[in-house]
Amino acid sequence: MSANNALHIAVLGGDGIGPEVMAPALEVLRRIEATSDLKFRFTDAPAGANNYLATGKSMPDSTVRLCEEADAILLGACGLPSVRYPDNTEIAPQIELRFHFDLYAGVRPARLVPGVPSPIVGADQRGIDLVLIRESTEGLFASMGKGVVTDTEARETLVITRKTSERLFEFSFRLAERRKARGKANGGLTCVDKANVFRAFAFFREMFDDAAKRHPGVKADRLYVDACSLMLVKRPWDFDVMVTENMFGDILSDLAAGLIGGLGMAPSADIGDRYAVFQPCHGTAPDIMGQGKANPTAMILSTAMMLDWLADKHGLESAAEAGERIERAVDKAYAGGIKPMEFGGSNGTADITRA
Ligand code: ATP
Ligand code: MG
């Protein structure tokens, strides 16, 4: 925090609908500023595919430095299908940030906002309020750019380390405890793996079991990823906090977003010991960009997660309150009949922001 106690926020709008959902999120934060004792200083920074086209850099050094200096980082979305690196890989500077800042915990809450249609029968009565924690620096993604491909075969390597897993599980148990303390949940944590087939996942589960012994207040569970996929669709209300490897988390978090209405409703945070990036789960949605159709709710809920993280980090009670106010405002908007185009309604970005 700077001298005048303003929270310095690095703002990376990115590409496609990234800037379109970032503007509403900043509008909400300015409203928070006007109605609380919180002060923000926003600094815009270039990153992404358009910047790569213009300058040859998808994540300029100046942007990385700005992120290092900031109290928190907000990111819209980066990458466009038509723009690729010379080796034909996707432009995904958000993944580079995860590695650079060692953001090992990808936190993906999936809460069904009352009034939003879920494809799951019974969800509107029973509710869905779970948090998926996706390890974000290793697992199968540790192989990114290192895969070996010949004419006859291709190999990628999955990596699970003790150092990262122990921090990941501590983080996960602590989150389960915080949710329980706030009366938000029953204090459960489910480890999702494939320990029956792969030794790497048996190692992952062993470390989870050790962490569970240090957190007797949390009900620790284990599930294989296949069984978990089935249960998530049949009884999503049974889950509280879940923790899993990078690739499984990538897939399950899209599934979880589907349970609560769509990607436009799903916020996320990539959190490390010191830094954190807050961004919606969705990508740049080139199919709807520039049409005012994007649902900004995921981005707005990501700012609520940012406020909650800042509150925890700096002991800022008013930031925690502001985060809860944003969640309540989202609930009120949907209870009041807002229906995004994303799920067949007629409300676009501007209507949803105003509501
Ligand atoms: P990435 O590779 O970055 O994960 P993706 O190719 O999986 O991106 P998204 O950009 O997330 O795809 O979009 C997937 C679908 O969801 C698209 O049809 C898109 O229009 C829709 N979508 C994503 N975000 C939103 C949003 N905020 N509002 C409305 N629709 C959205
Ligand atoms: Mg995707």
Image (cartoon, rainbow, N blue to C red):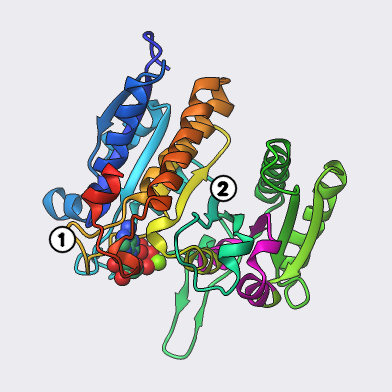
Which labelled disc corresponds to residue 170? none
Q: Is residue 282 in view from this perspective?
A: yes
**x and y percentages locating residue 100 in the rendered image:** 45, 43
Q: Residue furthest left?
A: 54
Q: Are marks 2 and 1 in contact (CB under 8 Å)?
A: no
**x and y percentages locating residue 286 in the rendered image:** 22, 65
Q: Can you tell me which quadrant of the image ligand 1 is in?
A: bottom left
Task: Report the Cα–Cα distance between label 2 and label 1.
Answer: 35 Å
Closer to us: 351 or 54? 351
* Residue occupying image coordinates x 83% and y 55%: 209
**x and y percentages locating residue 27 in the rendered image:** 27, 35
Amino acid type, mark 2: Tyr
Amino acid type, mark 1: Gln
Q: Is residue 237 magenta?
A: yes
Closer to us: 164 or 176? 176
Label 2 residue SS: loop
Q: Is residue 149 magenta?
A: no
User: Does residue 77 sit above or below 320 in this rendering?
Assistant: below
| Residue linked to disc 1 | 291
* Magenta region, residue range: 228-251
